[in-house]
Amino acid sequence: MPLRRITTLALALSATAATLTALPGAAAARTPDPLRWKPCAEEQQEPAETAKDVNDSRDSRDSRDSRDSRDSRDSKGAKEPELPPLECATLDVPLDHADPGGRRIEIAVSRLASEKPERRRGVLLTNPGGPGISGLGYPAVLAASGLPQEVRDAYDLIGFDPRGVGRSTPVSCGLTQEQQGRGNFPAWANTPDDVVREARRARQIAERCAASPSAPLLPHIGTADVARDMDHIRAALGEERVSYLGASYGTQLGTAYASLFPRRGDRIVLDSNLGPGGYDHRAMRLFARGLEDRFPDFAAYVAAHPEYGLGTTPRQVRATYQELARRLEREPVQGWDGTAFRGITFDRLYADANMPELAEIWQALDTGGPVPEQPPFPGVEPFMSARFAVICGDSPWPRTIREYQRDVRADSRRYPLLGGSTANIGPCAYWPRSWVKEPVRVDDQGPSNVLLVQNERDPGTPLAGAKALRRAFGDRAVLVTAGQGGHGVYPFGVNGCANDAVTTYLTTGQRPARDLACAAEPAE
């Protein structure tokens, strides 16, 4: 899916988080050698092809967002800002942190150094989301997308590709084109038999991963493993403590780091939050809740534009959605079935700027006109492979078909826009048991240094997850909510109140004294 602006890209850098897994505590290891920086190759610092967090949702053709975020002009015709050049380095870490003397793998790291040494206070480790997407170019995206200069002056911005992704020992399950085409969300289930059919596909994917050449790596690329890599990066940078800015799945990484290494975190900012369980079975089902939260914004937009012919009231627009989805289930149009239609609706509602394009797609599917072109999405196979390895290995998922049939029945009623898909069975039900870890425990033990920031109507990481994470952190955290829709707040969103709260914390260490609700602010 084409995105037109770096701003939209970063908004998109999203969502899906994964569960916090792993061994309690951190294994002792040798002190890493200092990083040896050199200019990044041009392709290293480009934003990830999967940037949007092609995350959690969609049919593969619906998960291409970030790719065109580098178009030369935004929707107003303004010249796209240049990405600043980055420095790159590699770091050796243990494949298995419980066996620090065993096999080692490479982690790719990037840096955008502060140009004001007298104002520099440390490093700001960053992650854009995922799981399964590159973070190497993210410091440049942040800088080009309006990260305040005082933040850039105060920190060296550090990016990295999580293990199993991009240039950090990538994994592949060797998924077939058909399996790749299934995308991230299971097919919509109308009946118990639909769950049985999806179970066969899910099992085949899990078995293919278990038989792949990457199988020895797959049990070791979970969230807790990456959090331990983050601490190796901290040590290699020569820092006693590290600040952190993570979005979407990046909030799970930040939560894991703050829980495993509570005294090594400085100022922790988590934007667009998963719950304390990360990207677990509950989070997958919550995507349907997220679409219910967000859909009224789109319904109001479409109702205010009768030229689309999709309804003149929000109720009519919702009815059009349901009717179109049922029609496409019976008879796909131009390759679009009901699951793909639901998926692209979820996907495009990550950002307000996508609403006109989404309305045009609906209109074309409704009238039989040509659907706006969806460019091919490169890199979908390694993205999906890494994503499955993280979410399936981070925490136990239900393993019986009956449980998923029950969930589909419940969520189809509770969340009729998307629940019949997100509650359906996936490969995690068949993931090898020996590869599955226990989630990292999140509690209130540790310094009060976490700032959560969250849109109220976020489809990818619903507000319910942020509130649950806030409760789990207790007095360690403060929650700032923005009365906006969409995925991603800082620094790409329009809510000045929420953005200012984050900038103030990163630059001065001052958080709001208590949870803060920021009123909606109009887009400029």
Image (cartoon, rainbow, N blue to C red):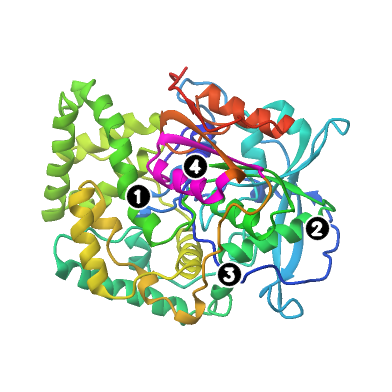
Q: Residues within 10 Å of mark 1 (few under 14, many from 20)?
A: many
Q: Label 3: state its secondary structure.
A: loop
Q: Nearer the viewer, residue 221 or 475?
A: 475
Q: Report the side of 309 relative to 181 (left or right).
A: left
Residue 2 to residue 102: above or below = above
The kind of residue tagged 1 is Phe
- The mark nearer the N terminus, 4 or 2, is 2
- The mark nearer the N terminus, 3 or 2, is 3
Q: Residues within 10 Å of mark 3 (few under 14, many from 20)?
A: many
Picture quadrant where residue 204 is located:
bottom left
| Numbered tag placed on residue 272 in the rendering | 4
Residue 177 to residue 5: above or below = below
| Numbered tag placed on residue 235 in the rendering | 2
| Numbered tag placed on residue 131 in the rendering | none
Q: Report the side of 120 relative to 419 (left or right).
A: right
Q: Quadrant of the N terminus?
A: top left
Q: Residues within 10 Å of mark 4 (few under 14, many from 20)?
A: many
